[in-house]
Image (cartoon, rainbow, N blue to C red):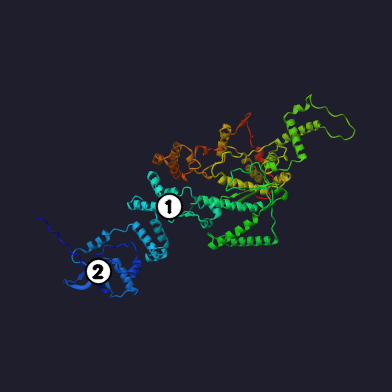
């Protein structure tokens, strides 16, 4: 015989005046959590009470109901109603929907109500916000209705707009909320689903890896091309910017690369037309030029454009304001925001006065040209005044004769005995009067003088150093090297292989700035260079010498040019200057290294930087994915390939080379004890 199913009886419900309700000490909730009482009160005022209170009749000692009801479950709703009563927005006798419980344990009811309810899945909230938006509510109205910020509503709507396939995976806990947030960077559902498939095979499933996959090929807003054209102009032209609403994105990513390139080309062309109107013979335009693009070209030495009286007055006013503000806040640990902003404005004004365009000889402008490109900071870079060899004015006859004479002197100085060979031309017959000295005799006399100069110069290190600085500076900064009798040469090779980003690297920019600073400190005419250098103090000459000599460094490996001893010396030189290529800005990326070596090399790099376990996690990936994952793992690790490493070396502890039993530098007393000449400040401090 079948057993009858016992039917349950639900507790009755009725409205009870608010002033007949009290909180129960049996309520298990003690810790405040979730929506605040104030926000809950506002929601009840707007929507009414969506869920009744769970109450029990209060019994006196005789077991008789007192007409008061305690609340073991629903205490937060009661407090919200109480707040509305205090604010006179709800009557004290207003009826409150309640479920009257009889029997059982009050604590059990309170615990069950708080534990048995399932929290709303975030995806349901996202979709609910989206439904409200589709029904016409604005983001501001939704934010006001649910007591959240507009930014939160935007984030929720963005999450709800992700591909339905991804939302289904998220609903089944196949993705974390942070991962889903990362997918919102791109609004392309097809692209999102492609990355989801790649994610299944990837070692690194972190949100930043997802963002990187979604933005591959896009142009970062911090890229110099994007900064050059401006994000606003790009969007006005119809371009799309991928943004991350959940973390800093440095301005986002410009998705339409073709549009970026077209806008860059158009703006550069317009800027080039302005530069061309200055009268230059040629203009070369590109977003970027290869490093060393000016090698072999003579650079004109222009003069700063003089300031007008009004400009001089404006500059003096700006300088006075800057000095006054700096002095007033000299002792402040931190500048007020408005003062800091004002100082920045004044610095920009003063810099504009100090970096005015140079004025060039119109005749020189007609045979020179300019390079127009984009600097690393996104500003226009114009390199004016470069003359190609084919555009040079024919060399004057006297220069040619001088060069021929120098060649003759060089031959005579290196092979002195040849000057008196039997085949030498005979002396001219004696003539009356002061006839010119014969070339042969002049050669012999200057040969003796050359030996005298060699001997004397070799005993005066300071003058020899000055002569070397003078000769090499002529080679580095002037078109011709005829103003020195020293047979010193300076070669600054260009690079056949251009590494990615070479011209915008930290080192390249520092060298360019330093070279320009020295060029401004040097005289315009090479004939006055000796006197200028002679007036500088030793430290300034040494700094210039270091810069000039540095331009001759060539440690480039070339398959056709085997130079093992030169590379060994490059290692010693790197040790001497404590070269750190990681600190110099080089990083292992897909473009610079990882995408151009074998998988074994990639795994070796990860092993060295992060350990074997990290390498094992990416060992199963295809090379492209492996390179990208390795780039993330090696970011900011300081890892360098062997060719870029500098081995530590104690230069000071090395033994000094010996010559014939004595050290090459002697005992050092002559130099150490010699009186230092009085320092002469250079005309322009070049640091």
Q: Is residue 231 left or right of residue 617?
A: right
Numbered-mark total: 2
Task: Identify the residue under disc 2.
Answer: 98
Q: Nearer the viewer, residue 177 or 6?
A: 6
The secondary structure type at the circle numbered 1 is loop
370 lies above or below 125: above
Residue 534: x %, y % from top left: 71, 45
Residue 646 seen from this side: no
> Dot 1, crowdedness within 10 Å: few (<14), some or many (≥20)?
few
Residue 262 seen from this side: yes
The secondary structure type at the circle numbered 2 is strand
74 lies above or below 375: below
Residue 125: x %, y % from top left: 35, 59
Task: Identify the residue under disc 1.
Answer: 188
The residue that appears at 70% across and 60% down in the rendered structure is 308
Q: Nearer the viewer, residue 144 or 308?
A: 144
Residue 640: x %, y % from top left: 49, 40
Q: Nearer the viewer, mark 1 or mark 2?
A: 1
Q: Quadrant of residue 290?
A: top right
Q: Nearer the viewer, residue 493 or 181?
A: 181
Q: Is residue 44 left or right of residue 640?
A: left
């Amino acid at each position: 015989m079948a057993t009858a199913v016992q039917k349950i009886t639900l507790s009755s419900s009725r409205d009870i005046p608010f002033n007949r309700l009290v909180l129960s000490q049996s309520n298990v909730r003690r810790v405040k959590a979730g929506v605040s009482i104030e926000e809950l009160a506002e929601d009840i005022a707007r929507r009414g009470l969506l869920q009744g209170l769970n109450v029990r009749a209060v019994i006196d000692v005789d077991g008789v109901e007192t007409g008061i009801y305690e609340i073991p479950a629903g205490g937060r709703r009661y407090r919200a109603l109480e707040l509305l009563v205090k604010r006179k927005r709800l009557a004290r006798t207003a009826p409150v929907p309640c479920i009257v419980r009889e029997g059982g344990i009050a604590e059990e009811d309170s615990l069950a109500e708080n534990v048995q309810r399932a929290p709303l899945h975030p995806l349901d909230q996202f979709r609910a916000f989206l439904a409200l938006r589709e029904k016409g509510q604005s983001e501001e109205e939704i934010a006001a209705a649910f007591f959240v910020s507009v930014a939160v509503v935007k984030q929720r709507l963005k999450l709800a707009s992700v591909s339905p396939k991804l939302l289904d995976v998220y609903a089944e806990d196949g993705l974390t909320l942070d991962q889903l947030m990362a997918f919102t960077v791109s609004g392309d559902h097809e692209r999102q689903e492609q990355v989801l498939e790649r994610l299944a095979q990837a070692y690194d499933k972190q949100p930043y890896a997802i963002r990187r996959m979604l933005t591959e090929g896009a142009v970062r807003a911090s890229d110099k091309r994007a900064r050059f054209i401006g994000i606003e102009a790009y969007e006005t032209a119809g371009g799309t910017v991928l943004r991350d609403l959940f973390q800093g994105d440095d301005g986002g990513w410009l998705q339409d690369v073709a549009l970026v390139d077209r806008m860059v080309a158009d703006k550069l062309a317009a800027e080039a037309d302005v530069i061309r109107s200055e009268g230059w013979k040629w203009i070369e335009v590109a977003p970027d030029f290869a490093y060393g693009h000016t090698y072999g070209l003579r650079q004109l030495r222009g003069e700063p454009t003089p300031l007008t009286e009004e400009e001089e007055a404006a500059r003096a006013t700006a300088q006075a304001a800057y000095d006054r503000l700096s002095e007033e806040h000299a002792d402040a640990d931190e500048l007020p925001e408005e003062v800091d902003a004002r100082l920045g404005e004044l610095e920009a004004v003063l810099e504009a006065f100090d970096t005015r365009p140079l004025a060039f000889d119109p005749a020189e402008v007609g045979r020179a040209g300019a390079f127009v490109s984009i600097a690393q900071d996104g500003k226009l870079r114009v390199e004016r005044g470069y003359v190609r060899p084919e555009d040079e004015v024919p060399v004057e006859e006297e220069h040619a004769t001088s060069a021929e004479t120098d060649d003759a002197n060089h031959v005579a100085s290196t092979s002195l005995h040849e000057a008196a060979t039997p085949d030498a031309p005979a002396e001219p017959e004696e003539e009356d009067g002061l006839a010119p000295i014969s070339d042969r005799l002049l050669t012999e006399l200057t040969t003796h003088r050359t030996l005298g100069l060699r001997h004397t110069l070799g005993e005066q290190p300071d003058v020899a150093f000055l002569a070397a600085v003078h000769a090499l500076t002529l080679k580095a900064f002037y078109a011709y090297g005829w103003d020195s009798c020293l047979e010193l040469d300076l070669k600054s090779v260009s690079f056949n292989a251009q590494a990615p980003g070479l011209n915008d690297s930290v080192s390249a920019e520092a060298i360019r700035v330093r070279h320009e600073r020295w060029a401004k400190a040097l005289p315009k005419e090479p004939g006055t260079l000796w006197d200028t250098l002679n007036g500088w103090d030793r430290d300034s000459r040494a700094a210039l010498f270091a810069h000039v000599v540095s331009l001759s460094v060539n440690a480039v490996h070339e398959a056709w040019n085997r130079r093992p001893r030169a590379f060994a010396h490059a290692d010693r030189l790197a040790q001497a200057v404590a070269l750190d290529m990681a600190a110099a800005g080089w990083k292992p990326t897909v473009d610079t290294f990882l995408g151009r070596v074998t998988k074994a090399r990639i795994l070796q790099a990860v092993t060295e930087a992060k350990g074997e376990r990290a390498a094992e996690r990416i060992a199963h990936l295809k090379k492209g994915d492996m390179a990208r994952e390795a780039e993330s793992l090696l970011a900011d690790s300081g890892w360098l390939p062997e060719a870029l490493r500098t081995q530590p070396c104690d230069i000071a502890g090395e033994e000094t080379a010996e010559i014939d039993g004595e050290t090459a530098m002697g005992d050092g007393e002559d130099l150490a004890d010699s009186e230092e000449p009085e320092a002469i400040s250079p005309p322009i401090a070049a640091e």
